[in-house]
Image: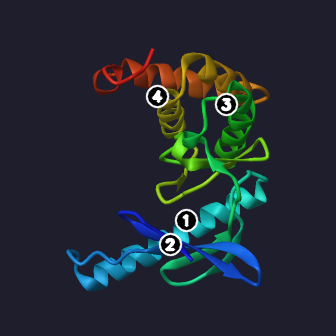
């Protein structure tokens, strides 16, 4: 068993019937009132599972839900390498743009769209970790997803990503316009890579 402990959840990789699976358990927060903590952890676990199921139904490359508990999600293990651990490769950008487009068109924003949450498996990108994701069609939230990704890759890579994202995307231009608007705001402008 392999275990990773984050601020919000513990991730375990276990063997189940000779197959690796992920078990994500939301961590108890001792500083919160117990009843509130239980409600929040249960709500966030269910929300994340619903989002992953929505993505599964929209054919977005993401883990598959296998089981759901009160604070736990069991999902398929995606065997591959985190994009952040690979040298930047422009060949990945087009398929990543396509997956993000499918995710956004399904009404889901990731909330933490960076190379740390993309696994490359046989040159195919899989988006993971939907703990901060939301179901929304808000253009600004989608633009912020793109901004996070833009900040974490080279300008050329982002351009390739963007060309795939807007291709046959009925809302692509609106999201890009919103991205430009968000970047012009003071608090984002200082931190935006150009």
Is there CB contact under 8 Å for labels 1 and 2?
Answer: yes
Above/below status of 67 relative to 155: below
- The residue drawn where x is 48% and y is 76% is 25
> Rounded to the nearest whole Å, what is the CA distance between mark 4 and mark 1?
25 Å
Numbered badge on residue 151? 4
- Label 2 or label 4, whichever comes before in sequence order: 2
> Rounded to the nearest whole Å, what is the CA distance between mark 2 and mark 4?
28 Å
- Label 3 or label 4, whichever comes before in sequence order: 4
Note whether residue 109 is visible.
no
Closest to the camera, between mark 3 and mark 2, is 2
Is there CB contact under 8 Å for labels 3 and 4?
Answer: no
- Label 3 or label 1, whichever comes before in sequence order: 1
Above/below status of 100 relative to 178: below
The residue closer to the viewer here, 49 or 14, is: 14
Q: Which residue is mark 2?
A: 45
User: Where, by quadrant of the figure, is residue 36 drawn?
Assistant: bottom left
Closest to the camera, between mark 4 and mark 1, is 4
Residue 22 appears left or right of 9: right
- Decide: few, some or many residues near mark 3? Use Cα within 10 Å; few <14, some 14-19, many ≥20: some
Residue 175 appears left or right of 148: right
User: Where, by quadrant of the figure, is residue 18 drawn?
Assistant: bottom right
In which quadrant is the N terminus drawn?
bottom right
User: Where, by quadrant of the figure, is residue 49 drawn?
Assistant: bottom right
Closest to the camera, between mark 2 and mark 4, is 4
> Rounded to the nearest whole Å, what is the CA distance between mark 3 and mark 4?
22 Å
Note whether residue 52 is visible.
yes
- Label 4 or label 1, whichever comes before in sequence order: 1
Q: Which residue is mark 3?
A: 171
- The residue drawn where x is 23% and y is 75% is 32
């Amino acid at each position: 068993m392999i275990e990773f402990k984050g601020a919000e959840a513990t991730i375990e990789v276990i063997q189940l019937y000779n197959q690796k699976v992920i078990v994500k358990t939301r961590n108890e927060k001792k500083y919160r009132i117990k009843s509130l903590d239980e409600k929040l952890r249960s709500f966030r676990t269910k929300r994340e599972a619903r989002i992953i199921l929505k993505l599964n139904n929209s054919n977005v490359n993401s883990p598959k839900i296998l089981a759901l508990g009160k604070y736990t999600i069991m999902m398929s293990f995606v065997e591959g390498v985190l994009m952040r651990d690979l040298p930047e490769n422009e060949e990945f950008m087009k398929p990543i743009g396509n997956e993000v487009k499918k995710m956004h068109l399904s009404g889901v924003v990731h909330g933490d769209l960076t190379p740390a949450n993309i696994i490359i498996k046989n040159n195919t990108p899989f988006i993971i970790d939907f703990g901060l994701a939301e179901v929304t069609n808000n253009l600004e939230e989608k633009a912020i997803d793109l901004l996070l990704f833009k900040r974490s890759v080279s300008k050329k890579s982002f351009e390739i990503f963007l060309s795939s994202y807007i291709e046959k995307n009925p809302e692509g231009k609106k999201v890009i316009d919103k991205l430009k608007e968000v970047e012009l705001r003071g608090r984002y402008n200082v931190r935006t890579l150009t």
